[in-house]
Image (tube, grey):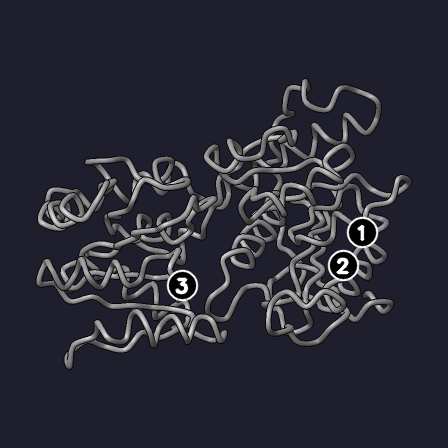
Amino acid sequence: MRIGLIAPPWVPVPPPAYGGTEAVVDNLARGLALLGHDVRLFTVGESTCPVDREHLYEYAFSPIGITVPEAAHVLAAYEALTDVDIIHDHTALGPLIGPHLDGPPVVSTCHGSFDPMNSRNIASFADHVAVVAISHAQKRFADPIPIATVIHHGIDLDTYRYGPGGGGYLMWIGRMCAAKGPHRAMEFARAAGRKLVMVSKIREDDERAFYEQHVRPLLGPDDPEPQELPLQDRVRLLQHADALLNPIDWPEPFGLVMAEALACGTPVLAFPRGAAPEIVDHGRTGFLCTGTQDMLDAIELIDSIDRTDCRAEAERRFDMHRMARDHVALYRRILAGHAGESLLSLVPAATEVTVRPSTQSSTMLGSRT
């Protein structure tokens, strides 16, 4: 198939540091290419994902959410991708303004929550765009929006390799905000007498304000300041961490960092919000904790978790190649439906098995090579 992927214009693909959606798009693009498909990614010029790339803007926009540049980006993407078999849009705005009745069928992955505002937007295009949920927990909030399928994220298991643990520290990774629970993670680590290493994005004004008010006061003289680290440094820390603390305070649609930790053999201690129960196998790959005492008890039980079980579960459920195959099955159903058959009642076709190297070119709009 000729598959067009549209990434948001806020972060390069793959992300140089923080960027969950962009990491997923990168893994999906590479996974589809390895299955033998012709993948074209519309992103920003500084992206390095090793498939054919096109762009309108050379550099990513900041801060996230500037409407006019995003609109120009997605309109240019749909214009550039008119000759593909199917378009998979990972932006929030794109499916609202981009699809054409005479253009390729469109898939939209909702990377955020189905909150009232988001749901209203998605409902306006869900009758002609196939909507993908990234977890069953997220799908439960989608009603009455029709969901074409649920596909869990996949990660590059050759990058997130198994590690031995034993570093003598706990980890927290995420954007600096209340919903991600960095202040709770610090409180739990302090109460348990354990060192906490925090890897965090603290670039936006609201992130800096939350850090100064709620997290910095909790740091002791020997506690390291949170940093936003490159991928390899983040992986190395995960490989040697005793556990990942993930005390989220919102119904997180997926939680990529939990799958990344498991791939490194690192148990996950999380609150059972959002998709956490779909990722963490309580008592086997970590613990789902209902409050402070539960979390403190779980920290004492970290050594009861076999790190090889964590890695095995990541290999079984969160491999990027599994994610790519699941998307291929969806694309085939949609293309069959586009040809006149019932979209959601079709049995997925067999997965592609041909493997070929992907190309690595990036072109400006209107000058594809």
Three-letter code for the amino acid on which mark 1 is drawn: Ile
Q: Secondary structure at mark 2?
A: helix
Seen from the viewer's position, the closer of residues 94 and 325 is 94
Q: State how far apart marks 3 and 1 are (Cα).
A: 31 Å
Residue drawn 64% across the image and 51% down it? 90
Disc on the earlier residue, 1 or 2: 2
Three-letter code for the amino acid on which mark 3 is drawn: Cys
Neighbours of disc 3 within 10 Å: few (<14), some (14-19), many (20+): many
Q: Where is residue 246 shown, x and y percent of the image?
A: 30, 52
235 left or right, relative to 11? left
Q: State how far apart marks 3 and 2 are (Cα).
A: 28 Å
Q: How many marks?
A: 3
**Residue with the most extreme right position:** 102
**Residue with the most extreme bottom position:** 221
Q: State the image quarter where residue 199 is shown.
A: bottom left
* Disc 1 to disc 2: CB gap under 8 Å: yes
Residue 74 marker: 2
Q: Which residue is mark 3?
A: 177
Q: State how far apart marks 1 and 2 are (Cα).
A: 8 Å
Observer-side mark, 1 or 2, equals 1
Three-letter code for the amino acid on which mark 2 is drawn: Val
- Location of the C terminus by quadrant is bottom right
Disc on the earlier residue, 3 or 1: 1
- Location of the N terminus by quadrant is top right
Q: Is residue 332 above or below residue 91?
A: above
303 left or right, relative to 363? left
Residue drawn 21% across the image and 54% down it? 243
Residue drawn 31% across the image and 53% down it? 261
Q: Which residue is mark 1?
A: 97
Neighbours of disc 2 within 10 Å: few (<14), some (14-19), many (20+): many
Observer-side mark, 3 or 1, equals 3
